[in-house]
Image (cartoon, rainbow, N blue to C red):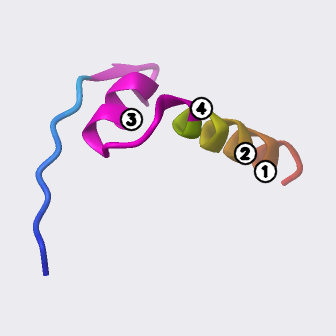
Amino acid sequence: MNKITVSLDVIIKNKNVIVSSLNVAKAFNRRHTHILRSIEDIKRDWTFS
């Protein structure tokens, strides 16, 4: 199994972990637009739960 080490700048605010979508895209070698789309999909799914 391959091991991946990722370093992200994380902020903890009101017991929530916050990370920049730009940093996520860079860390996982993905397009920022795809990360944003995934975030919107998750937000939409949470709205209907």
Tell me the tag on residue 45: 1
Residue designated by label 2? 41
Cα distance between the residues tagged 1 and 2: 6 Å
Residue designated by label 4? 36
Q: Give residue 46's position: percent from left, percent from top.
A: 76, 47
Q: Give residue 17's position: percent from left, percent from top.
A: 40, 31
Kind of residue indicated by mark 3: Ala
Kind of residue indicated by mark 2: Asp
Q: Earlier in the sequence, mark 4 or mark 3?
A: 3
Quarter of the image with the C terminus is: bottom right
Residue 23 visible? yes
Badge 1 density bin: few <14, some 14–19, many ≥20, Cα 10 Å: few
Cα distance between the residues tagged 4 and 2: 9 Å
Helix, strand or loop at label 1? It is helix
Residue at left offset 36%, top offset 35%: 24
Q: Earlier in the sequence, mark 1 or mark 4?
A: 4
Q: How many marks?
A: 4
Q: Give residue 38's position: percent from left, percent from top.
A: 62, 44
Q: Which residues are magenta?
A: 10-33
Marks 1,2: beta carbons within 8 A: yes
Q: Quadrant of residue 44?
A: top right
Kind of residue indicated by mark 1: Asp
Cα distance between the residues tagged 2 and 3: 16 Å
Badge 2 density bin: few <14, some 14–19, many ≥20, Cα 10 Å: few
Q: Residue furthest right?
A: 48
Badge 4 density bin: few <14, some 14–19, many ≥20, Cα 10 Å: some
Residue at left offset 53%, top offset 38%: 35
Q: Is residue 49 above or below residue 12?
A: below
Kind of residue indicated by mark 4: Leu
Residue at left offset 40%, top offset 24%: 22
Residue 20 visible? no
Badge 3 density bin: few <14, some 14–19, many ≥20, Cα 10 Å: some
